[in-house]
Image: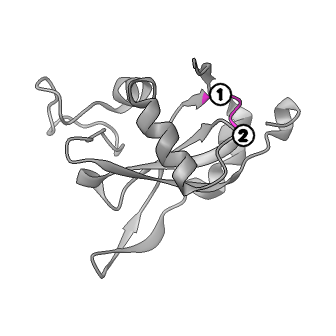
Amino acid sequence: MSIETRPITKEEIEMLASYMKEHKTTLWGQACKTTPTLVDTVFGDGGSLITLEPANSRPDYYIMLAPSSIKCWRGALDFISENEELIYEPIEIEFGNVDDEDYDEDEDVGGTLALSIGSGYTAGHYDTFTNTAEGGG
């Protein structure tokens, strides 16, 4: 099954602003802060807000709009594992990939999270996302 993609709109970015704020979390029992990184590509109808958390960059993670058929954590994980190439490509284009031989980790990428899937990842499901600017998602 082919998943349609499109660039995220300015309206969607504005609607997601509250999800992109720095917040406190824990990692291995230690308090820390993280700021989610928004993927600029929308997958499918963009009706679900999901996360992709590469193991090498925890607690940092990406958030993205994905098909509305995703209703839970397992659905998000299945979607990512079944569409890795489709999902990784726009992230690598926008932020780079630390697993690439050509990636310079000393290069300033503007405080963004470079993709690093080498040791695996997990996923999450935030909520159903309704884009009222486009008549619903």
Disc 1 residue type?
Answer: Gly
Question: From the viewer's perspective, is residue 34 above or below residue 49?
Answer: below
Q: Which residue is mark 1?
A: 44
Q: Position of residue 100 (x, y in %)?
A: 17, 28
Q: Left or right: 120 with respect to 44?
A: left
- Residue 64 placement: quadrant: top right
Is residue 38 visible to the viewer in this orientation of the structure?
Answer: no
Disc 2 residue type?
Answer: Gly
Q: Which residue is mark 2?
A: 47
Q: Is disc 1 in contact with disc 2, using a CB cutoff of under 8 Å?
A: yes
Q: Main secondary structure of the magenta part?
A: loop
Q: Nearer the viewer, residue 132 or 104?
A: 132
Q: The C terminus lies in which quarter of the figure? A: top right
Q: Secondary structure at mark 1?
A: loop
Q: Residue at x 79, y 44 (%)?
A: 130
Q: Residue at x 61, y 57 (%)?
A: 126
Callout 2 crowding tier (Cα within 10 Å): few <14, some 14–19, many ≥20: many
Q: Secondary structure at mark 2?
A: loop
Question: From the viewer's perspective, is residue 89 above or below residue 38?
Answer: above
Q: Which residues are magenta?
A: 43-47
**Marks 1 and 2, Cα distance to the nearest angstrom?**
8 Å
Q: Position of residue 34 (x, y in %)?
A: 40, 62
Residue 27 colored magenta? no
Q: Residue at x 10, y 26 (%)?
A: 101
Q: Position of residue 31 (x, y in %)?
A: 34, 79
Counting labels gives 2
